[in-house]
Image: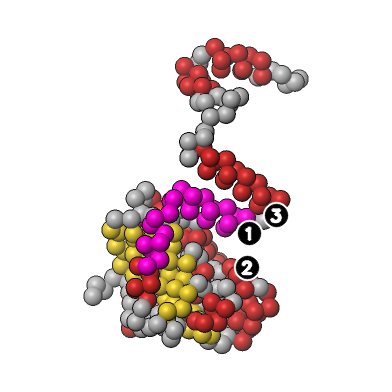
Amino acid sequence: MSSKPVELSMEGDVARILLNRPEVHNALSIELSDMLVDAIQTIKRSTTIKFVVIKGAGRSFCVGDDITEMLRWGDDEYGKSTQGANGVMRRVRIYQDMANSLEELDKMTISAVDGYAVGGGLEITMACDFVIATQRAQWGMPEVDSGITPGWGGTTRMARYIGKRRTKEINIIGALMSAERAVDWGLWNQVVPDDKLDEEVDALLEVLRVKNQQACRQLKFIINRGCETDLYTAQGFEMLSGGLSGAVNGFWEVADADQGKGVVDFEKKGELWKKRRTLSKNFWAG
């Protein structure tokens, strides 16, 4: 097995990210985290990748941040402890940006969880669209017992999935929970036998692959954005998505729209553009 802490493979329409520090249950070292950021950005730029699968090497998905490195979070680029709390905040913002980028990918994302998914590992799953876990998988946010708090989803995304009261329970008590409870609480999607994880991921990919991919992208977008805003605004996203769906399915013409003439006329500085600007540029300008 390669010694790289993150393995990215892109074949056909699927990108696979392997967290590859099995000797420490794929703890998120600074190096691994930086490579994960790069992998997500590589996938983001791709127009051929439609699906992303994230998995951990060995016996666990990911046990979160490598706490043995946390004292270095305040170091500058030369390894000197000069950044202090600001350096820690900078590192947390990098991780938040990573989770946000993962959540906002215009691809369907799947976490394939075996063993432990705790701390930052659990936060990765919450930024994905689907989570499939083995029966032996366990999850939780044990940061409190190391005297630290989560930084990129353990209190925020979690509360949006399972509510304020249960999020307090998970973070303040710090217990490790079963995969079945994650499904019961709406945090994960499906629990499968320990030897069926890859098979179930492939089955989900087969289902997703036959969908209208543009419709899936729109659904992901309006659901992610809509749940963060009020109902009235969220309905606006639904309405615009409905219009876009009509357009991409062939019903794009609107009688009193330009049909692109305004853009073409701007480039040519044609009569339509000149008339509009002549009437508009000084209107009520004082």
Kindly indicate whether the residue at mark 2 contacts the one at mark 3 (C-beta within 8 angstroms): no
Pinpoint residue 106: horizontal percent, then vertical percent.
45, 53
Q: What stretch is highlighted in magenta?
A: 203-226
Q: Where is residue 169 in the image (x, y as percent from the top left)?
A: 64, 83
Q: Is residue 48 magenta?
A: no
In contact (CB < 8 Å): disc 2 and disc 1: yes
Q: Which amino acid does label 1 sit on?
A: Cys
Q: Residue at x 51, y 73 (%)?
A: 188
Characterize the local packing of mark 1: few (<14), some (14-19) or many (20 or more) Cα atoms within 10 angstroms.
few
Q: Residues within 10 Å of mark 2 (few under 14, many from 20)?
A: some
Give the side of residue 126 with respect to residue 27, left or right: right
User: Label 1, on which residue?
Assistant: 227
Question: Label 3, on which residue?
Answer: 231
Residue 258, placed above or below residue 193: above
Does residue 123 appear left or right of residue 200 in this picture? right
Helix, strand or loop at mark 1: loop
In the rendered structure, the answer to whether residue 183 lies left or right of residue 229 reads: left
